[in-house]
Image (cartoon, rainbow, N blue to C red):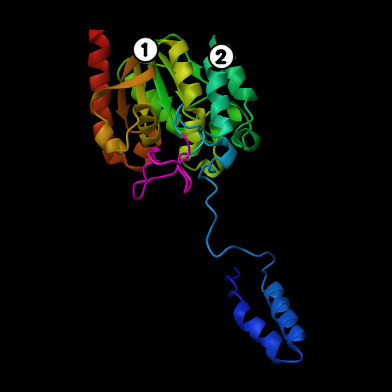
Amino acid sequence: MRGTPPRPDITAMADVMTEAPDARAVLLAALRLQLDWGADEALLDAALDRTVPRLAAPALAPALAPGLAAAGPDAAPGTPRPAPPRPGARPTLLAPPAASRAAELAAGATPLAEVQAAMAGFDGSTRRETATNLVFADGTAGAPLMLVGEAPGADEDRLGRPFVGVSGQLLDRMLASVGLSRDGGCYITNILPFRPPGNRTPTDAEIALFLPFVLRHIALARPRRLLLLGGVSAKALLGAKDGITRLRGRWREVMIDKESTLPALATLHPAYLLRNPLAKRDAWADLLLLRRTLDGD
């Protein structure tokens, strides 16, 4: 594998151009060497973070409240001046257009079929272009328990159903151990409907983009309780920053919309249990809590 070629010293090259008669030839030779090393494009000194939303253009800045004028150097005495920004405070950012469209599409979907169609037609994410199938849901819509996972894997992407791979087989055994199944009493979906490239963890931007669809999906499916599988699902729906080991093990509330909440139990993702068999003891404790609670409903 080729190593990263050293960056050319542009300042030194400029000095050579002014001091030596054959400076142009020297510079061209240095550039040719970079091409031979495999450098075929110029890069910035620091990586550009494209996940950060762009700042609002000056023309789109929020208007001042009625009666207030911009306090510049020529402002009249007594004109209120805006407070200086707090140290470390972030500038006000506009909501990305894709996120606004996602929220509008989700809010306008009434039956579950419209939610699925809205997600399939949503072009605000490139995940649709890199995935094979939309993975919407499986099980019985309207069941008292709704499971929310992370994102489809390779098997799910191929078949268009959630939790059909090795981790899905473990999930089926876990549910069966407490008398549940996706064929009756359960309904299953994911935070992301499309497989992330390479089965990587969904980014915060991807989660925020599809969260309105997930919340609308839950609202229309009308479960009595939620089981959140893994840290991505738990943190997204609970609005928490803690890891799954801190979030699991007790019932919490998920805000579905401005007027309703649902009790939710976070537990370990089956894929995590396959990698860490000793953690199955904690997952079993969560399942027992789930069973006792459902029996009491």
Residue placed at 62% from the left, 32% from the top?
128
**Crowd around label 2: few <14 · some 14–19 · many ≥20 (10 Å):** few
- Give amino acid for label 1: Glu
**Crowd around label 1: few <14 · some 14–19 · many ≥20 (10 Å):** few
Residue 253, horizontal then vertical, whole percent? 29, 21
- Give amino acid for label 2: Gly
SS assignment for the magenta stretch, majority: loop
Question: What is the C-alpha distance between the residues marked 2 and 1?
Answer: 17 Å
Q: How many marks?
A: 2
In the structure shown, which secondary structural element does the residue marked by tag 2 occupy? helix
Residue 243, horizontal then vertical, whole percent? 30, 39
Of the 4 image quadrants, the one containing the C terminus is top left
| Occupied quadrant, residue 177 | top left
Q: Report if residue 208 lies within the magenta region.
A: no
Observer-nearest of 76 and 5: 76
Judge whether 126 appears above or below 113 on screen.
below
Observer-nearest of 66 and 109: 66
Observer-nearest of 245 and 96: 96
In the structure shown, which secondary structural element does the residue marked by tag 1 occupy? loop
Judge whether 221 appears above or below 204 on screen.
above
Residue 235, horizontal then vertical, whole percent? 36, 33
- The magenta segment is 69-92
Q: Which residue is mark 1?
A: 259
Query: Residue 83 vs residue 4: left or right?
Result: left
Image marks 2 and 1: residues in contact by CB distance under 8 Å: no
Residue placed at 27% from the left, 40% from the top?
278
Q: Earlier in the sequence, mark 2 or mark 1?
A: 2
Observer-nearest of 164 and 202: 202
Q: Report if residue 85 lies within the magenta region.
A: yes
| Occupied quadrant, residue 239 | top left
Q: Which residue is mark 2?
A: 108
